[in-house]
C-alpha cells in the first residue's frame, strides 16, 4: 500500500505551501511555462550532533509524482481564495492550466536507507520550473521528517547492540500521518517492530504489544491480572511489572510463569516501565534465573533514547529488548532536520544547455553549490566509503580523485579507491522508473551502510567529519559565479 492509499490524489497536490502556487502562477504569467530548472534537496548539518544521516522517504517520491493532480474540486477551492488586497488570488487561465496538470519531472535520489551527509543533494529534481516548484513542499515533507527519524533510530539501534528495539511512539507522534512516518522510517533504520497496527497493515512491518497498567488496575489484584492475561494471550505473554511494586510484580510473574509451564506454555518476557531500570533489571534477572526461568526475557521502556540505553549497558543491565517511544517519535532533542530545496541551474527549454545559478548570502553557511550535480562516492578496498565528491559533468576538470572541501576551499582531499554514482533515477518525465522497492530492501541497505561506516563517524561524542567536497571544475564554477555576483553588486572579487 502506498503513500496515497489513505487519501485521494488531490489531497497530495494541495498538501503544499501557498507560495508554491503563487510562484507557479507567476512563472505561468511570465511566459516561463517551458522554462526548466534543477533543484537540490539537502541539509546543512548532521542531526543530533552526529556524523551522518540516513536517507529516508525517497521510496514514496514516485507515488507523490504519479498522484499529483489538481481535480475539479481543488480548482474550485483555489478559485475561491481571496488575495489580501481584494479579488481572486488566482487567475482563471492559470487554474485551467492546473486542471488535471501532470508533473513532467525527472528525479534522482540517494537510495533509501543509505547514509548521506551535509550539503550534498539527497534528491535532485529536474523539469519544468513550475512543476519543480509545485512539488517542493510535499517532497520536503516526505524526506525531512523520515530522514530525521531514520537517523535517530539508527543511533538507538546502535546503542542497543543487537537487541530488538520496538517503536512505541504512536501516541506521542505528531498526528496520525506522523505516526505512520515514524513506524516506516524507524523500521528501515533497524527497529524490529512497531506498536502501530495501521503501519503494520500498510507497510508490512511486524507489530508488537501486550498490555498496559490499566489492565492490571482493572482486576482485584496484580496476580489476578497476570493470570488472566496469560490465559488470554499465552503465545504473546509479556507482563508489565511496575504498576504497583516491581518486587511484588516479580514474585507474581514467577508464579504465573510456573503455572504456564504446567499448561505447556511459556512466559515470553516481562516489561519494566519506570524506576532505576539498571537496578531493577538486575534484580529481575537474578530472581527469574533462581526460579529456573532463565528463558524469560527482560524488556524495558520509559523515555529511552540512545544515551539512556548506552548508559544501561555500561551499568551491566541484563536487558533483552527496548520499547522506545517519545524520544524516537519526536526525534528528541532535535525537532527538525532543516532540509532545504534550492535552485542550482536553469534553462529556457529542454533543448537548451543548463545555466548554473548560485545563491550568495550574508550568512556563509547558506551559500549554495551551482550546477547539475551528482555524487561520486569513493570506497576503499573493504567497501567502506571514504568521501563524497560533488560533480557537474559540464564543467568537470577531468578524471581526478582530488576535491576541495565543500565549506573550506583551502582544504582538499585526495580520495583513494574507485567511485560509484550515488544518485539513482526513480522518476523520469513524471513516471516511475522500475518496480517499487520494498522497505525490506531499504532496511538491508541501511544495515549495510551503517556497518561499513568508519566507527569514528558513527560514535555519539565528537564524531569524525566525513569528507564531502567539490570536484575541481565545480569548485572553479562556484568561485567564478560568486565573483560575478560580487562584481555585479559593486563588491571586490576574489582571485
Image (cartoon, rainbow, N blue to C red):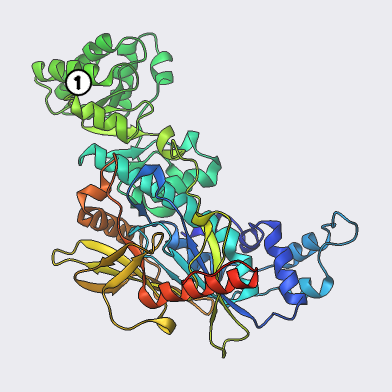
Residue appearing at x 38%, y 49% in the figure: 150
Query: In the displayed image of the protein, which residue is found farthest to the right?
Result: 86
Where is residue 401 shown, x and y percent of the image?
Answer: 26, 74
Task: Where is residue 148? Give x, y as percent.
Answer: 43, 48
Number of numbered markers? 1
Q: Residue furthest bottom?
A: 351
Q: Secondary structure at mark 1?
A: helix
Q: Residue 110 location, x and y as percent?
A: 38, 65
Mark 1 closeness class: few <14, some 14–19, many ≥20 residues within 10 Å: many
Instruction: Answer with left or right where residue 384 lies relative to residue 243.
Output: left
Q: Residue at x 34, y 19 (%)?
A: 274
Q: Is residue 474 left or right of residue 412?
A: right
Residue 152 in the image: above or below residue 355: above
Report x, y in % for residue 58. Answer: 44, 62
| Residue at 86%, 62% in the rendered image | 88
Residue visible at 76% across and 66% down in the picture: 75
Task: Report which quarter residue 247 is drawn in.
Answer: top left
Residue of label 1: 257
> Is residue 298 among the parts visible in the rendering?
no
Q: Does residue 424 appear to the left or right of 251 in the view shown?
A: right
Can you see residue 453?
yes
In the image, taking residue 147 as reference, residue 230 lies left or right, namely left
Q: Nearer the viewer, residue 235 or 269?
A: 269
The answer to which of 232 and 445 lies nearer the viewer is 445
Along the viewing direction, whichever of 368 and 43 lies nearer the viewer: 368
Residue 19, placed above or below residue 183:
below
Instruction: Determine the image quadrant of residue 349.
Output: bottom right
Amino acid at each position: 500500500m502506498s503513500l496515497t492509499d489513505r487519501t485521494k490524489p488531490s489531497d497530495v497536490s494541495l498538501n503544499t505551501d501557498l507560495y508554491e502556487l503563487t510562484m507557479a502562477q507567476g512563472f505561468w504569467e511570465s511566459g516561463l511555462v517551458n522554462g526548466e530548472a534543477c533543484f537540490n534537496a539537502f541539509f546543512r548539518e548532521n542531526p543530533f550532533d552526529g556524523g551522518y544521516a540516513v536517507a529516508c522517504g525517497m521510496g514514496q517520491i514516485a507515488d507523490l509524482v504519479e498522484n499529483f493532480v489538481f481535480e475539479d474540486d481543488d480548482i474550485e477551492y483555489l478559485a475561491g481564495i481571496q488575495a489580501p488586497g481584494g479579488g481572486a488570488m488566482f487567475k482563471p487561465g492559470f487554474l485551467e492550466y492546473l486542471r488535471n496538470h501532470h508533473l513532467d519531472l525527472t528525479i534522482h535520489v540517494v537510495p533509501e536507507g543509505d547514509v548521506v551527509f551535509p550539503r550534498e543533494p539527497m534528491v535532485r529534481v529536474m523539469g519544468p520550473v513550475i512543476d519543480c516548484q509545485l512539488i517542493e513542499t510535499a517532497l520536503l515533507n516526505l524526506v525531512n521528517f523520515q530522514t530525521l527519524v531514520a537517523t535517530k533510530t539508527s543511533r538507538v539501534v546502535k546503542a542497543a547492540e543487537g537487541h530488538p528495539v520496538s517503536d512505541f511512539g504512536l501516541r506521542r507522534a505528531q498526528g496520525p500521518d506522523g505516526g505512520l512516518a515514524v513506524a516506516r522510517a524507524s523500521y528501515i533504520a533497524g527497529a524490529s517492530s512497531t506498536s502501530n497496527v495501521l503501519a503494520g497493515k500498510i507497510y508490512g512491518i511486524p507489530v508488537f504489544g501486550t498490555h498496559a497498567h490499566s489492565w492490571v488496575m482493572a482486576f482485584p489484584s496484580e496476580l489476578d491480572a497476570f493470570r488472566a492475561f496469560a490465559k488470554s494471550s499465552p503465545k504473546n505473554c509479556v507482563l508489565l511489572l511496575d504498576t504497583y511494586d516491581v518486587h511484588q510484580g516479580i514474585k507474581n510473574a514467577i508464579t504465573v510463569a510456573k503455572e504456564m509451564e504446567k499448561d505447556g506454555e511459556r512466559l515470553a518476557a516481562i516489561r519494566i516501565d519506570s524506576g532505576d531500570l539498571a537496578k531493577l533489571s538486575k534484580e529481575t534477572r537474578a530472581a527469574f534465573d533462581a526460579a529456573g526461568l532463565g528463558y524469560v526475557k527482560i524488556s524495558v521502556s520509559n523515555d529511552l533514547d540512545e544515551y539512556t540505553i548506552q548508559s544501561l549497558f555500561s551499568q551491566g543491565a541484563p536487558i533483552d529488548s527496548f520499547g522506545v517511544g517519545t524520544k524516537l517519535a519526536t526525534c528528541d532533542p532535535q525537532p527538525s532536520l532543516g532540509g532545504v530545496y534550492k535552485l542550482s541551474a536553469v534553462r529556457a527549454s529542454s533543448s537548451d544547455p543548463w545555466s548554473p545559478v548560485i545563491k550568495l548570502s550574508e550568512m556563509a553557511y547558506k551559500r549554495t553549490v551551482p550546477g547539475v550535480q551528482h555524487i561520486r562516492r569513493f570506497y576503499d578496498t573493504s567497501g567502506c566509503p571514504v568521501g563524497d565528491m560533488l560533480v557537474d559533468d559540464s564543467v568537470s576538470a577531468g578524471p581526478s580523485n582530488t576535491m576541495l572541501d565543500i565549506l573550506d576551499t583551502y582544504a582538499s582531499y585526495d580520495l583513494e579507491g574507485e567511485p560509484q554514482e550515488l544518485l539513482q533515477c526513480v522518476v523520469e518525465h513524471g513516471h516511475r522508473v522500475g518496480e517499487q522497492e520494498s522497505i525490506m530492501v531499504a532496511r538491508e541497505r541501511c544495515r549495510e551502510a551503517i556497518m561499513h561506516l568508519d566507527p569514528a563517524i558513527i560514535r555519539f561524542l565528537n564524531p569524525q567529519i566525513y569528507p564531502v567536497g567539490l570536484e575541481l571544475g565545480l569548485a572553479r564554477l562556484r568561485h567564478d559565479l560568486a565573483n560575478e555576483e560580487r562584481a555585479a553588486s559593486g563588491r571586490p572579487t576574489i582571485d
